């Protein structure tokens, strides 16, 4: 039965039935559109609630029924083909193993590349060190004239400048 049919049966409005279900947290079943669907047990519970309210009991004093109903049909679909699920799980596991293997090989390749680059840089540093030592030996053998020890002095005299006209100094573009 739907909400309006139950409301007619009890002699109340549909909003009253909906309010009872919500306020008392009644575990009523809903259909695929979200509308309440009442079976005979639910109708009996609602009749008892209606009687209590008719006898003067406040809705806050009515103890809510906390039974859990079976979920509506068709909400969850069970796995029908267990063999296909096992095959899929095996394939995923195999792909994960291959992925880890590939990641390991990539990391190893990168480490080897870095090692080669470091060895090349070390050989260049060694070569530059040898060349520097050779230049130092040559420099120590060569007698440097005393002129290099004298300080270098730049000519500090100012050259002649043209005097600018007052107008051109004011308007720099003339």
Image (spheres, rainbow, N blue to C red):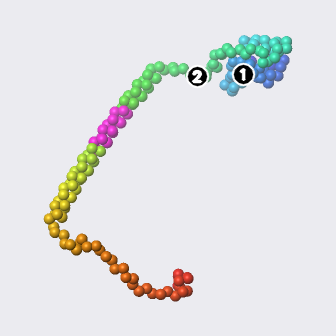
- Residue 8 location in percent, x, y? 82, 18
Q: Earlier in the sequence, mark 1 or mark 2?
A: 1
Magenta residues, dominant SS class = helix
Question: Contact (CB < 8 A) between labels 1 and 2?
Answer: no
75 lies above or below 52: below
Q: Let me know if residue 6 appears in the view.
A: no
130 lies above or below 109: below
Is 68 magenta? The answer is no
- Residue 112 location in percent, x, y? 28, 42
CA–CA distance in space, label 1 to label 2: 19 Å
| View extreme (left): residue | 141
Q: Secondary structure at mark 2?
A: loop
Q: Let me know if residue 41 appears in the view.
A: yes
| Residue that appears at 25% across and 73% down | 150
163 lies above or below 57: below
Report which quarter residue 48 is drawn in. top right
For the record, the magenta segment spans 99-113
- Residue 118 location in percent, x, y? 27, 47
| Residue that appears at 16% across and 61% down | 137
| Residue that appears at 26% across and 46% down | 116
- Residue 89 location in percent, x, y? 43, 25
Residue 88 disc label = none
User: Mark 2 highlights which residue?
Assistant: 76
Look at the image and tell me in which quarter the N terminus lies. top right
76 on left or right of 27: left
How dense is the environment of label 2, judged by Cα within 10 Å: few (below 14), some, or many (20 and up)?
few
| Residue that appears at 82% across and 22% down | 13
Q: Secondary structure at mark 1?
A: strand
* 22, 13: nearer the viewer: 22
Residue 36 disc label = 1
Q: How many marks?
A: 2
85 on left or right of 70: left
């Amino acid at each position: 039965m739907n909400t309006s049919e139950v409301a007619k049966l009890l002699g109340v409005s549909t909003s009253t039935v909906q309010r009872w279900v919500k306020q008392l947290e009644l575990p009523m079943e809903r259909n695929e559109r979200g509308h309440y669907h009442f079976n005979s047990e639910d109708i009996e519970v609602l009749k008892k609630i209606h009687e209590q309210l008719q006898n003067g009991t406040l809705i806050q004093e009515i103890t809510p029924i906390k039974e859990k109903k079976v979920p509506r049909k068709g909400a969850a679909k069970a796995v029908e083909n267990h063999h296909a699920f096992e095959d899929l799980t095996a394939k995923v596991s195999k792909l994960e193993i291959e992925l880890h293997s590939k990641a390991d090989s990539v990391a190893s390749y990168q480490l080897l590349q870095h090692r080669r680059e470091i060895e090349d840089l070390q050989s260049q540093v060694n070569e530059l060190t040898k060349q520097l030592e050779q230049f130092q030996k040559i420099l120590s053998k060569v007698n440097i004239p005393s002129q290099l020890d004298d300080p270098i002095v730049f000519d500090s005299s100012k050259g002649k400048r043209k005097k600018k006209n007052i107008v051109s100094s004011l308007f720099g573009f003339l």
